[in-house]
Structure formats: C-alpha cells, structure tokens
Image (cartoon, rainbow, N blue to C red):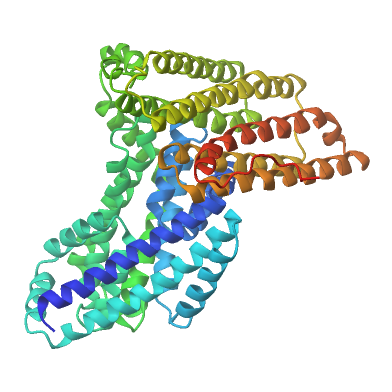
C-alpha cells in the first residue's frame, strides 16, 4: 500500500471516530442533557460527589472537554465554587480514560446490532428521546467500526521500511514525541481519539509501550489546552475551571514525563499487552492527578484566579461594556433593501432568543436558591427583552415596502410574531414565575423530592423545546418544526400526569406538598404556556409546506 493510500484510509478512520463520538455526545445532550446538568449541579457542592459525577458524565458524553466547559459555565454563574468545579473536571478526565479502556475490548458484534437497532429506532418514531437514543446507538456502532478501520489501515505499516526510522527517532527523542502527541490531540480536539490511535499502533507492534506512554503524557497535555482555548474570550469567571485543569493536568504531564525519562520504570505492573500498558498508563496518570488534586486544588485555584485576573481587561474598559451589550444589528442604512433589513432583524431576534434562553435557564436556579439581589437582576434582564422587542417593531415598520416580495412580507410578519411571543415569554418568567420564587422564599417552604424532580424534568423539556424553536428561527427546517409541535402535544399529556401525581400526594396528606401546592401547579402551568408560545414558531414553516391543518376540530 502506498503512503498516500495509507493516509487516506487512516484519515477516514479517524474522521469517522471523531464524527461517531460527536454523534454519541449530541444524542446524549439532546435527550438527557438538561437532566444531566441538573444532576451535576446538585452534586457539585460535595467535592467527592463532584468528582464522581464528573466521571460518570464524561463517560456518558464521551468527552471530558464538554464536561469542563459545562462545569466552567456553572462556576462562571456562581452556581458552584471553583474548587468543586476543578475536582469535577478531574473526575471527568478519569471517566474519559475509562472510555478508552471500554472501547479496547472486542466489541465487533456490537457494530451490526447498534447500527440495526439504532437506525430502526430513529426511523420508527417521532419521539425526541427515542430518536436521540437511536442516534446514540448508531454513534456507538460507527465508533467501534472506526476502530476496526484504524486497525486494518495500520496493518501494512508492519512491512514499511520508513516507519521504523520514524519510530526509532521518536523513541530516541521523547521530548519531540511528547510535543507531537500534544499537537495532534489538540488538532483532534479529542484525547479519546488520540489514545485509541496510539493503542492501535501499539497492538500492531508499530509503537513500543515506552514510546506510547511518553506520547500518552503528550496527549494529556494537548487535551488540557482545548477547553482554555475555547473559553479564551469568555468572562473571567468562566475561565477559572478550564485554566485550573490546564495547570493541574498540563504540569502533571510534564512532571511525570521528566520522572519517566529519568527513572525509566519497568512496565510489568501495567500489563503484558502493549496496548493495555498504554491504556492503563493513561488511566493511572489521570487517577494520580485526581488524588494529587485533592490537597493541591486550593493552591491551583488561587494560582488560576491570579492568572485570570492578570488576563482580564483593565477597569476603565468596563465602562464600555454596557454600550457593547446594547449594540444592535438593526442597521438603519439597510432599510431600503428589504432582504438585507430582514436579515438584520433575524440577527437581532436571535439575540433576543439568547436572552430569553438565559432567563429560562436562570429561573429554575432561583427556585432552588434565591435572594433579593438575584431576583432583581433577572427582572432587569426582561427590560433588555422589552427594549429589543420595541426596537425590532419600529425597525420592521420602517422597512421600504415597495421592493418587498411576497416572501419578504411573509418573513416580516413571521419575525414580528416571534418577537411578540418572546416578549410574552419574558413577561411570564418575570411576572409569574419570579412571583412564585418570592412566595417560596418568603414562606421558607421546600418541594418534596418527587415534586422537585417533576418540576425539573418538565422545565428541562420546555428548555429543550425552546432551543429547538430558536434553532428553527434560523434553519426553517421542516423536521424540527414537526418535532416541536409534537412535543407540544406530549407536554400537554405530561402536564396532566404531573398534576394527577401532585393531587395524589395531597390526598396522602404529604405536608410539603400542601405547603407548595399552589407554587407547584402554577409553575407547571406557566411552563406549559411558555412551551405553547414557543411551539408557534413552527406554524409558519409547516403552513408554508402545506403540513398544517386549518383547524384541530373534527368535521361533523
């Protein structure tokens, strides 16, 4: 096999591995993402539980970087401390290493099973969670298939005359091997893919265990750079956890590289198989950093906060932030070009969607823990929604009508309707749900465990539907529109079941249920109303394609 053919096959296998990993992560996030975020948020107060939850979440998402970004956002919002966040990420790194071990087993039989059942489930139903479960199964099948492809593509390297020269050079120059692995991992944006590629080469006898372990340390260095680079433009509080992970994991990889070169330890305890030795070294490294991170986490946190403070803009720039926050996409010079003007309105409406999404996320956090300052801050966000709503209405009224096509007119009415609905959602959150938060705070009552689980689950569904609606505003995708309307019908049934269970708890005389009864039912009602408003985003798309009936009434 020529070198170009080898690289083509290997590049295809690696691309499939990265795509399959993304499929699994996307399926898990869409189907269970909000529930997982709730569970993570609830456990981050305890450092031990934080590490364990990070480990499990990393296995589910097949990405420690995704967990790092999620935990970093929680720390940025003040939901969790930086200390708990750093430990949760350490657990996530161990979970990512365990994923490599799981995938190292012979899972060949799972390929046809996952592809068959995953595809069947995805095509057989319109229910979002089942479709995403099917997506996850297909992703797992493709992931295992990609490993087989990598093994087959690397087989001819055994007979290559050039590969021993390259491997020999890297074996004699561990620093270069270490840095090469770090760069490749950063380009892959996946430590799982990089380690699996190494183990494939080791299993074929191409890479020695000693060289493989040096490069595994490089993989950990490269992986620790991904999240800090992705959050480099975020507010300072959001960068603390990713940067703390870089300090702990990155420095740890450098220290252990030096120790490995100087002491040259034997590898018998890591197993007899070359691939196993690399995998076990990867797991051992991350477990060691987790253990070391428990006593060192406070020191790392202080160092990270100091570095972030140095990177933050000077105080004088803060005066410009409100002006930047109020920057608008509504360019008055485009009013004579209806098509361009409507594109500007779409951009501004997307910003309005992002603000409403933040409000919808934040409101449930206030149900858990609220104070007067937090309540007033969220109420102030609604003023931003109102200002943008008013600005968009005025801008739409000023667009030149004479050059407007029928399609432009339809889009104009659609965007106006979306803005009205978004403003109504903001009002429900501030006028209704914040009032429930205040009532709960003043009375000092708490939901039952079952009642809170119902509320959190219902809220997670509404939030997921909100993101579908906001995406639909840009994509105009028919399948997304159909799914959004079907979710509206499903949530109507869920609301009935939730109310029924709540009344059952009242009949049983559960004291907590009695105390929080009106708050529970009113919140479910408000969330249902928000979901109904957002579901209307789908109607213009379906109507344009002739997929929306004129009435829900049955004919006589």
Considering only vertical position in the picture, is 116 above or below 542?
A: below
| Left or right: residue 129 compared with residue 325 | right
**Could you tell me which quadrant the N terminus lies in?**
bottom left
Numbered disc total: 0
Q: Specify the quadrant of the image occupied by residue 193.
A: bottom left
Residue occupying image coordinates x 27% and y 42%? 229
Q: Specify the quadrant of the image occupied by residue 100.
A: bottom left
Q: Specify the quadrant of the image occupied by residue 533.
A: top right
Q: Nearer the viewer, residue 213 or 481?
A: 481
**Image x and y of residue 261, in percent:** 18, 66
Residue 255 in sight here: no
**Image x and y of residue 294, in percent:** 44, 48
Residue occupying image coordinates x 75% and y 24%? 444
Task: Residue at the far bottom: name it.
Answer: 159
Residue occupying image coordinates x 57% and y 67%? 121
Residue occupying image coordinates x 49% and y 48%? 478
Q: Nearer the viewer, residue 186 or 138?
A: 138
**Image x and y of residue 481, in percent:** 53, 45
| Left or right: residue 70 compared with residue 503 | left
| Left or right: residue 358 compared with residue 239 | right
Considering only vertical position in the picture, is 349 above or below 225?
A: above
**Could you tell me which quadrant the C terminus lies in?**
top right
| Left or right: residue 206 compared with residue 443 | left
Q: Nearer the viewer, residue 139 or 367?
A: 139
């Amino acid at each position: 096999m020529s070198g170009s053919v080898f690289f083509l096959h290997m590049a295809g296998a690696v691309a499939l591995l990265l795509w399959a990993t993304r499929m699994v992560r996307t399926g898990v996030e869409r189907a269970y993402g909000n529930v997982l975020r709730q569970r993570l948020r609830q456990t981050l107060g305890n450092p031990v539980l934080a590490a364990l939850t990070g480990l499990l979440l990393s296995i589910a998402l097949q990405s420690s970087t995704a967990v790092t970004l999620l935990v970093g956002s929680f720390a940025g919002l003040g939901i969790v401390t930086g200390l708990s966040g750093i430990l949760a990420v350490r657990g996530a790194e161990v979970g990512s290493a365990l994923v490599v071990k799981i995938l190292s087993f012979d899972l060949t039989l799972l390929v046809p099973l996952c592809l068959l059942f995953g595809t069947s489930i995805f095509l057989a139903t319109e229910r979002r969670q089942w479709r995403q479960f099917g997506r996850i199964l297909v992703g797992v099948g493709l992931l295992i298939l990609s490993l087989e492809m990598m093994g087959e593509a690397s087989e001819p390297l055994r007979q290559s005359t050039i590969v021993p020269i390259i491997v020999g050079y890297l074996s004699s120059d561990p620093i270069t091997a270490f840095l090469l692995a770090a760069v490749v991992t950063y380009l892959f944006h996946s430590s799982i893919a990089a380690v699996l590629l190494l183990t494939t080469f080791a299993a074929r006898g191409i890479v020695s265990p000693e060289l493989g372990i040096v490069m595994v340390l490089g993989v950990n260095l490269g992986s620790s750079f991904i999240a800090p680079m992705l959050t480099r433009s975020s507010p300072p509080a959001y960068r603390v956890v990713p940067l703390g992970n870089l300090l702990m994991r990155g420095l740890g990889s450098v220290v252990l590289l030096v120790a490995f070169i100087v002491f040259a330890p034997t590898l018998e305890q890591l197993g007899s198989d070359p691939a196993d030795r690399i995998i076990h070294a990867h797991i051992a490294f991350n477990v060691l950093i987790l253990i070391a991170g428990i006593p060192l986490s406070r020191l790392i946190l202080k160092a990270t906060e100091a570095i972030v403070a140095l990177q933050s803009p000077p105080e004088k720039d803060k005066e410009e932030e409100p002006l930047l926050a109020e920057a608008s996409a509504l360019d008055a010079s485009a009013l004579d070009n209806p098509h361009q003007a409507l594109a500007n309105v779409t951009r501004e409406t997307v910003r309005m969607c992002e603000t409403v999404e933040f409000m919808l996320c934040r409101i449930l956090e206030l149900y858990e823990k609220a104070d007067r300052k937090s309540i007033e801050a969220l109420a102030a966000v609604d003023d931003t929604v109102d200002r943008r709503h008013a600005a968009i209405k005025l801008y739409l009224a000023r667009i030149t009508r004479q050059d407007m096509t029928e399609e432009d007119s339809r889009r104009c009415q659609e965007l106006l309707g979306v803005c009205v609905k978004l403003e109504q959602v903001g009002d429900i959150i501030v006028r209704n749900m914040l009032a429930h938060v205040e009532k709960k705070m003043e009375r000092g009552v708490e939901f039952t465990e079952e009642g809170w689980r119902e509320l959190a689950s219902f809220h997670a569904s509404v939030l997921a539907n909100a993101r579908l609606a906001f995406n639909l505003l840009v994509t105009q995708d028919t399948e997304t529109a159909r799914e959004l309307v079907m979710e509206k019908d499903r949530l109507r049934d869920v609301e009935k079941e939730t109310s029924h269970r709540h009344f059952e708890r009242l009949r049983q005389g559960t004291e907590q249920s009695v105390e929080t009864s009106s708050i529970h039912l009113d919140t479910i009602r408000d969330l249902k109303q928000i979901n109904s408003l957002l579901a209307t985003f789908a109607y213009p798309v379906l109507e344009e394609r002739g997929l929306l009936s004129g009435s829900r009434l049955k004919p006589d």
